[in-house]
Image (cartoon, rainbow, N blue to C red):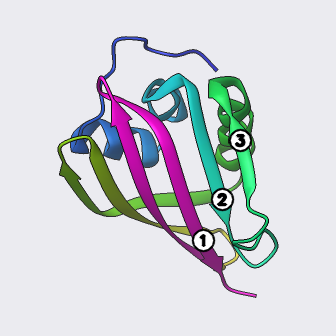
Amino acid sequence: MGTAADTAFGRDTLRQGVEGNPDILLSLYADDAELRIVDHTTQPSHPKVLHGRDEIGRMLEDVYSRDMSHTLEHCVIQGDEAAYSESCQYADGVRVLSESMIGLRDGKIVEQTLVQAWDE
């Protein structure tokens, strides 16, 4: 998975990345980014934490290799913070919803907390 080092965070770029181009999505992360994931298996007191663009890239490769669609529902950007909602659907109809809070530095994501839930 390659990266475009000069890609800066913005609503349109985030939409392109989320909705089908994981290379663009990965390019939005700083080299030292940290991503915390909270869901029913990695609860708030013990979230899954990914450190750096390499670990985040491996997670994105896994997610985007699945037969599912991704839609950016909402995105709010204010200064060096952003929040967005993403909805996903697997081919079998299972739906996933995630909410992210993001900290930015120089147009790159440096910290993200992602809370997700899915149909069971």
Q: Where is residue 43 in the image (x, y as percent from the top left)?
A: 75, 74
- Helix, strand or loop at disc 1? strand
| Labels 1 & 2 near each other (Cβ < 8 A) | yes
Q: Which of label 1 and label 2 is nearer to you?
A: 2
The C terminus lies in quadrant: bottom right
| Residue shown at the point (49%, 24%) measured from the top left | 30
| Residue shown at the point (66%, 36%) measured from the top left | 56
Q: What residue type is labelled 1?
A: Gln
The circle drawn on residue 67 is none
Magenta span covers which residues? 95-120
Measured in 3D between alpha carbons, the distance from the residue under mark 3 to the one under mark 2, in whole angstroms, is 8 Å
Q: Position of residue 86 (x, y in %)?
A: 44, 64
The circle drawn on residue 37 is 2
- Helix, strand or loop at disc 3? strand
Circle 3: is it few (<14), some (14-19), or many (20+) Cα within 10 Å?
some
Measured in 3D between alpha carbons, the distance from the residue under mark 1 to the one under mark 3, in whole angstroms, is 15 Å
| Residue shown at the point (42%, 30%) measured from the top left | 28
The N terminus lies in quadrant: top right
Q: Earlier in the sequence, mark 1 or mark 2?
A: 2
The residue at which mark 3 appears reads as 50
Q: Is residue 116 magenta?
A: yes
Q: Where is 72 relative to 31, above or below?
A: below
Q: Which amino acid does label 3 sit on?
A: Leu
Q: Where is 100 relative to 27, above or below?
A: below
The residue at which mark 1 appears reads as 116
Q: Which of marks 3 and 2 is nearer the N terminus?
A: 2
Q: Where is residue 66 in the image (x, y as percent from the top left)?
A: 72, 52
Which residue, as the protein is rendered here, is positioned at the far bottom?
120
Q: Position of residue 34 (x, y in %)?
A: 60, 39
Circle 1: is it few (<14), some (14-19), or many (20+) Cα within 10 Å?
some
